[in-house]
Amino acid sequence: MPTTAAGKKIEVVHDVCYHPLGPAVASSAQFLDVYVPPEAKEENASLPVVVFLHGGGWRRGSRRSNIFHFFQNVGLVLADQGFVAVLPSYRKSLPYAPWLLGMLGATALTLTALPLLFRRQSTRSTSSSVGALAGVWGGLALILRQLIRWVSPGVRHPAHLEDCARAVGWVQQGGTRAFGGDPGKVVLLGNSAGAHLASLLALDASKASTEIPSPLRGLIAISGIYCGQRFYQSWLMRHMFGYVFDDHPSWDDCFPLGRCPDPSDPSRPDSSSQLEGLCPVLLINAAFDVGLQPHAEDFAKRLRQCGAQVSGPVVLPGTDHFRMLPLLGRTQRSGGRVSSREDRELLPLISDFVRRVCQ
């Protein structure tokens, strides 16, 4: 049983299947872990439940890592705050080589073959042969890229969203009652791709195949991807992650900003109150956030225009996109002080928000 820096013993329940039809039909990714604080043992315990959706570009990551212990640290630090933490995994879109890697591979193969051509052919014929070989290798590289894409066992959007909706549904249907968690006090927490998914669920869970049965208490979205237009304006984002959404018929509908009513649309004159029923939202960004701060600013502006309760985006100085969540709760307290910026600034933001919305 893990012990936190504050001396609390946290019970961890691994590998709970959240698929409605059970483990016999579930994917290996459709399981979750529950982190239970000692407060859950109190009589009639009714603790807030925080469901954490991890990031990883929709392509990698899991609820726990046996090497670096990502993201067990998040579950432990949330339980240390007196919350029942639920960490689900979800199916991923496997990575494949983008166009750039395909072309680099073609170039490398062509250069490797040049010495053989110079040995066997005249200089004049070699020139045309090199061009032909480059064309052949380039074509093969692109065909190989497409084949990998077609046969990839990875899923596409909205499969990730459907899994996350099932996990939240499991909680709200009483899955955490045995661990002292109140199914009526559920807060979503997500980072990066997980913040994208958590935001979509909070905005409109009915777009996924499994509906969330009751309202959420709050959403904490950290360093998320919210704006489809900005996503596609970024060459890197579009080429590295665009295939995740290729199977979806409506591009804008894949991102939270596209799910919000547009106040400039004359066909929606009442958009200023469209999202009044949305749970309170807290948006957080790292100081170095790979271009994602404008996403949060656009999202916050649109939410406020539509009547939602929004805090932030709060930018935490000295933090970066890749280490903010993995470092949370990892430093030891010494003399009553906490040394990491994540524990000093990020953790109070999260815990204060959860307590406020779950009162």
Image (cartoon, rainbow, N blue to C red):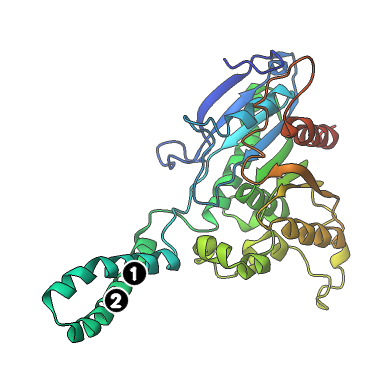
Which residue is more in the foreground, 338 or 124? 124
- Residue 253 shows in this picture: yes
Query: Label 2 amino acid?
Result: Ala
Residue identified by numbered label 2? 134
Q: Where does the C terminus fall, quadrant-wise? A: top right
Which residue is more in the foreground, 46 or 238? 238
Which residue is more in the foreground, 12 or 277? 12
Q: Where does the N terminus fall, quadrant-wise? A: top right
Residue identified by numbered label 1? 107
Q: Secondary structure at mark 1?
A: helix
How crowded pointer 1 is (Cα within 10 Å; few <14, some 14-19, many 20+) is rated as some
Query: Label 1 amino acid?
Result: Thr
- Residue 172 shows in this picture: no
The answer to whether 171 appears left or right of 134 in the picture is right
Kindly identify the residue that appears in the image at 44 percent across and 36 percent down. 23
The image quarter in which residue 200 lies: bottom right
The image quarter in which residue 8 lies: top right
The answer to whether 174 appears left or right of 121 in the picture is right
The answer to whether the residue labelled 2 contacts the one labelled 1, judged by CB atoms less than 8 Å apart, is yes
Where does the image place residue 350, in percent across and percent down from the top left?
77, 36
